[in-house]
Image (cartoon, rainbow, N blue to C red):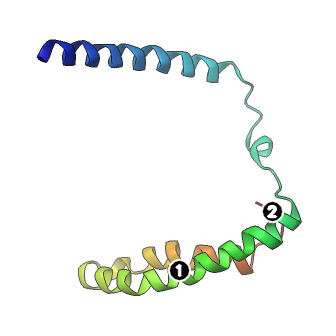
Amino acid sequence: MREPARSFTAALVAAALLLGSIGSAAAATFDDQGLEANQRETPVLLDAFVLRPVGLVLTAVGTGLFVPAAAVVGLTRPTDIGRPFQLLVANPFRYTFMDPLGQH
């Protein structure tokens, strides 16, 4: 019963090693055009009618989740209270209300 499990594990390890080396070799062949090539603009209509309402919902949900998270963090690590606030409330709020349309 152990022999099939060993063979299967060996085959998985061999496949992972082969696929990993192929993927890294393929990634090395592409030109690196810097950060500017990776930045793409989102269509304004998509941003205004789909992504911003999702950001508003995430802001509300994040605010609701921040209350119990703040209680736990306040009891265990009071100096780190800004971390869950930043992640759950401030980032969605900034995206929804402050970032320019189409810049994501």
Using the rendered view, name the quadrant where residue 71 is placed.
bottom left
Extreme left residue here? 1
Extreme front residue here? 1
Using the rendered view, name the quadrant where residue 46 is placed.
bottom right
Residue 70 appears left or right of 6: right
Q: Which mark is residue 61?
A: 1
Quarter in which the N terminus is drawn: top left
Residue 94 appears left or right of 6: right
Name the element at disc 1: helix
Estimate the x, y position of residue 87 in percent, counting from the top left: 51, 71
**Viewer-side residue, 85 vs 78:** 85
Name the element at disc 2: loop
Residue 90 appears left or right of 11: right
Q: Number of marks in the image?
A: 2
Using the rendered view, name the quadrant where residue 51 is placed.
bottom right
Three-letter amino acid code at the position of disc 2? Gln
Estimate the x, y position of residue 30 in percent, counting from the top left: 71, 23
Three-letter amino acid code at the position of disc 1? Val
Residue, x 44% and y 75% (percent of image)?
84
Estimate the x, y position of residue 66 in percent, counting from the top left: 44, 82
The residue wearing badge 2 is 103
Quick check: can you spot residue 53? yes
Quarter in which the C terminus is drawn: bottom right
**Viewer-side residue, 53 vs 25:** 53
Residue 19 appears left or right of 3: right
Mark 1 nearby-residue class (10 Å; few <14, some 14–19, many ≥20): some
**Is the C-beta separation of discs 2 and 1 under 8 Å?**
no
Q: Which one is earlier in the sequence, the residue at label 2 or at label 1?
A: 1
